Each structure stands twice: as structure tokens, then as C-alpha cells.
Amino acid sequence: MTLIAELERAAAGFTAALAGAASAAEVESLRNAVLGRKGELAALMSRLPELPADERPAFGKAANAAKERLNRLLEERLAAFKAQVDGASLSRFDPSMPGRMPERGSLHPVTLVMEELCRILNNLGFETVDGPEAETDFHNFEALNFPADHPARDMQDTLFLGDGLLMRTHTSPMQVRAMLERKKPPVAVIAPGKVYRRDYDLTHSPMFHQVEGLLVDDGVNLAHLRGVLTHLLRELFGPDVALYFRPSFFPFTEPSVEVDMSCVICRGSGRKGGEDGCRVCKGTGRLEILGAGMVDPAVFAAVGFDPSCTGFAFGLGVERVAMLKYGIDDLRLFFENDLRFLGRFVK
Ligand code: FA5
């Protein structure tokens, strides 16, 4: 029998065996036996030198064509077996089985509160501004009426970077930048961001977040400040929240106030569940929530505004608001990245 006839017989045998194969595994073993490196086809090819030189190209061509055709047939047969298996598993599909839910992420609680604060204040017309976290002494202290030897600098444990730079200790330097940029009133801005102090305990962290607000315009007074803060805190904590202004001191505001609000847990009663002392407000019925005041004329002078301008500023700690809003009593939880804690905020 000629070599080419042997090739045709092998191809016919392979086609018949493929048609009779009962499983994908059988098809795979046929692949090895016929098309594999030591298979029938390879053995025929190795006999090429037996042919006269002028017949070799025709045989080579026929062998390659057969190999291609058989490969295609084999892949078709394998695909048919796979489709059968898929069909069978689909028929076992139980639509009443509970699904496997993908894990869902959420925004960090501090981000959620920060975004809510900004949304409420943006709706009142305050524009959001940004500024550097590594600040100059001028923007963080000097322009805010803290001269170099002012004892009020001791209130904030500053992380100094050298070369006149420091990690900003509050968001107030951004109000200085906003006034310098705008050059004259009106100014209505909020400045959210990270701030840094050498501080660490249950309620203090070395990095935390503040949102600062500033309004400078004709005839701005404490009543406007009270109106804005009342709206802000009621939007955040509910319509029954009461506000209390206590005299305080900040170098950059005069008069300055510390703002308390009625306790969100005991609703200002100081008692909880028949007990005497509410744990959150320690029985006082009030919670300290933010610092504020009328902008000191010295600040206006430092940024080149007319010192007779009028304006108010306020600043609050975002973690503090988030702790009250979500009933969290350890601020460090915010920064431990524990998914059991963060998972509580998935909507
Ligand atoms: C200030 O930082 C002022 N710049 C706020 C201000 C702005 C007053 C404009 C007047 C006008 P104070 O140091 O009190 O103020 O900080 C504000 C809030 O930041 C505090 O009420 C507290 O909620 C929060 N806070 C302070 N230190 C920490 C800390 N280490 N960790 C977490 N929150 C803190």
C-alpha cells in the first residue's frame, strides 16, 4: 500500500473512532493515539524519506491537510460533550437555593459624615475650599492672631516639620487662604480636611478631621452664626436638638463660643432608662460639639481686609460628630480598619 493510501486509511479510521467515542476522555485518548507526537500520523510522516523526492511535497501537503481536518473534527466532538455536561448541570439548578452574595463595601463613617456636613452647608451657599496639610506657620498661627510667644499655641500640640512648616493643627488656615485669594468680602466657604496633633486616647487621635466654616459680609452677627449652626445640627441630629452657647476663647475669634447641644442619647434630661446618669453626656444633658465665634479684627488685618468687616467662623471635629451620630464610644475604632466595624455602615 502506498504511503498516501495508508494516510487515508488512518484518517478514515480516526473519523470512525471519533464518531463512536462515548466520552470526552475517549476523544482525548484518540488525540494522543493518532495526532500526538508519537501517534499514527507522526509515524507516517517519519517515513517520508521512503518516497521518491518528487512525491514528497504532495505527501507532505496531504498529511498536513489531514492533520488540520482531524483536529477540527476532534474539537467539534469535545465541544459537543461539554455542551451535554453543561445542559445536565443546568437541569440540576435549584432556583430556591439561597444565592451567594458578593461582599459589598461602603464609605468610611468619617467620609459619610464629612460628605453630609458639606452637603448641608453647600446647600446654604457655602463653597468648599481645599488647602495643604503641611502648612506654614503664618497660615496656621500667625495670621490667626497667635503671635510666636502667644500662650494659646500651647493648646495645640503641633507636629513641626522644620523649615517653617508644620502639619496643620486645624482647618482654620484654609479660611486665611480663602480670604487672601478672594481679596475682599463677601466670603462664604467651608474647609473640610485632615488635621494633626500630638494627641492619643479614647477620644483623641493624632490625625483627625475637621470642617471649618467662614462667612464674611456686611452686618454679619452672632444671630446669623446661631441660625446656621442650629440648621446644621438639626439636619444632622434631628429637629428637637437644642443649642447652647458658652463663652470661650480662641485667638482668632472675639467673642468666642463653645457650642453645646442637647444630648442625643438622653434628649437633654441627663438620665437614661430610669437611671440617674446618662453615660454619654455624664448626666449633664449636654454635649460639647464645636468651637465658633466672630472673626477677630486682627485676622482681617492679617489678610488685608478692612478690620471693620464682620464675619463668623466655626470649626468642628468630624470624628466627634460621627461618634455621636452612630453611638461609638472609642474614636480609635475609626482607624483600625476592622471590617466587623466598617461593615456596619454598608447600606
Ligand atoms: C479648633 O481647632 C478651632 N480651629 C475651631 C474653631 C474654628 C473655633 C473657627 C472658632 C472658629 P479645637 O481645638 O477645640 O478648635 O478643635 C475643634 C474640635 O476638634 C474639638 O471640638 C474636637 O471635637 C476635635 N478634636 C480636637 N482634638 C482632637 C483629637 N486629637 N482627635 C479628635 N478630635 C479632636
Image (cartoon, rainbow, N blue to C red):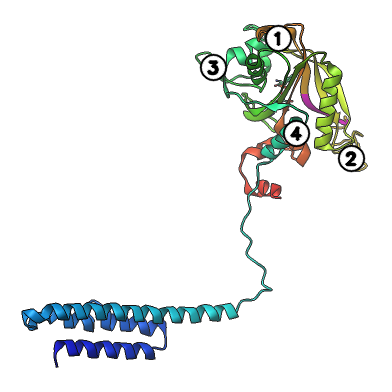
Asked where in the image residue 294 lies, by quadrant, the reply is top right
**Residue 300 has which mark?**
1
Residue for badge 3: 165
| Cα–Cα gap, marks 2 and 1 | 46 Å
- In terms of sequence position, does the residue under pointer 3 or pointer 2 come before the other? 3
Mark 2 falls on what kind of element? loop
Q: Residue at x 24, y 88 (%)?
A: 10
| Cα–Cα gap, marks 4 and 2 | 20 Å
| Cα–Cα gap, marks 1 and 3 | 23 Å
**Residue type at numbered disc 4:** Val
**Residue type at numbered disc 2:** Lys
Residue 160: give x, y in percent of width and height.
Answer: 55, 18
Q: Is mark 4 within 8 Å of ligand 1?
A: yes
- In terms of sequence position, does the residue under pointer 4 or pointer 3 come before the other? 3
Q: Residue at x 50, y 14 (%)?
A: 163
Q: Say if mark 1 contacts mark 3, CB within 8 Å.
A: no
